[in-house]
Image: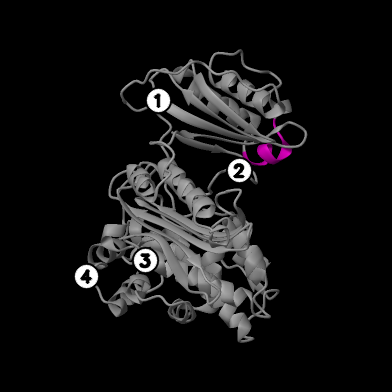
Amino acid sequence: MRALLAPAAGLLALTLAACTTGSDLTPQNTPTATPTATATYPNDTIGQAMQWFVGQMSTDKTDSNLAQRLSSEFTKHITPQQLLVFFGELRPQGPWITENTTTNGNNGTATLMNKYGQRFTLTMHVDDNGKIAGALVDSAPKGSTATTWNDVTKRAQLGIKDVSILAANIDDNDKLTDVHAHDADTPRPVASASKLYILAAIAEKIADEELSWDQELTLTEDDKTLPSGTLQNSAAGTRISVLDAATAMISTSDNTATDLLHRTVGEEAILTAAKNAGNDHLEGITPFLTPKQMFWLAYGPSEEAQKARSSWKSSSPQQRRELLKNLPMPGPGPQIPNNATTAQWPKEIEWFVSARDLADVHLHLQKLADSPTGKPLTHILTKNAGIKTPAWASTAFKGGSNTGVLSFSFAATTAKKSRQILIVTGRSTEPVDQNTVIAATTDAANLLATKHDPAKE
């Protein structure tokens, strides 16, 4: 079960935005677990909000003043009536037992167990008025906190079997010194992490005075595609600056903004930027698909789409371009069933990049950010920092997810001004446990930042 209610800034430990299908909210037949002692909630604002929330999930009388507990930001996304339906879906799984709680300011987490013995994590954020601004109920991660790199790899593999990990320090000459590398040079599907190459192409065009950050672009119907993001809800003819579109593409992984920017700079510029960034596996991203092309190629019902799917892997780049040219795309995207669980990456309908390639494009973007025209890049890349570890003072982040695919890429600066890189990517033909991979990635970030900062050595 995974249910995100009203996303709020600072709520999620890691935002997984991009190209995902629906989630199953029904309980599965899994072995029951024995709960630990029931925990009490802290007597602070966030603790009391979580206690109320779990009570509404469980056996407490339905709160007639439910709307009064929700912030205006929350109700922009989820109405009180929708929240009542959500609670109604969870009540049959109760009573819910709270095993432990943690609060920090306006944020809190609780480990819950339902009557089937399944464990879940409630993550919540309240605003300064004590009203719920966001909540996430998700399956709890597997494994224990990793304190060695071997443990990091093993924990990540509990969530997704085939992983690449690269942890490194960046020296004053912009060279990487590996701290840990696990299969870091094998190209793997990375989903929306590939959007870093589009951002690099934009920055290079601006440096060459062929584009500007404040230049306004016009959204067309052909640009619109499926979420993530919200730009697809805007009317054709809407004007948006390059800066705002690029920020949406990276911080919320807005797919329509990505299609718009892809059209603006062109595939040739994107592949040139990838080459300039040191990508040694251009065949894995050629042709460079737009999100819209990926959706229609992977799930389109037409004969042309079925033919393209079956022959894509064995086709040359030029043949693939011909397949795309003949691919019907009558709208933002095809109807994707909520139970779509077949990974498309084995057919090579994805963007294939190695962990080291992702590290290199982050380094390339850092160099571009230091140029006179590149300063907005820092804001774009750090608006969504992905994960938070106290030892990282700032974090440039881009992640990606697709069926059977996860990728997380970070270029961070420590409190001691050291620069570090962390890349975690994974692929599987089986269901992916995102939370366990997130937990392993968080462990890796903490390990890299606290144990391998060269300024402390």
The mark nearer the N terminus, 3 or 2, is: 2
Amino acid at pointer 1: Gln
Residue 74 among those drawn in magenta: yes
Q: Which residues are magenta?
A: 70-77
Residue at disc 3, secondary structure:
loop
Amino acid at pointer 4: Ser
Residue 18 among those drawn in magenta: no
Frontmost of labels 3 and 1 is: 3
Q: As rendered, which of 113 and 70 lies closer to the eye?
A: 113
Residue at disc 2, secondary structure:
loop
Mark 2 to mark 4: distance in Å? 41 Å
Q: Is residue 221 visible?
A: no
- Image-based side of 213 in relation to 252, left or right: right
Residue at disc 4, secondary structure:
loop
Is the C-beta separation of discs 1 and 4 under 8 Å?
no
The residue under label 4 is 314
Residue 49's x, y, as percent?
66, 26
Residue lying furthest front: 457
Frontmost of labels 4 and 3 is: 3
The mark nearer the N terminus, 3 or 1, is: 1
The mark nearer the N terminus, 2 or 4, is: 2
The residue under label 2 is 7
What mark, if any, has residue 118 been given in the picture? 1
Residue 269's x, y, as percent?
49, 81
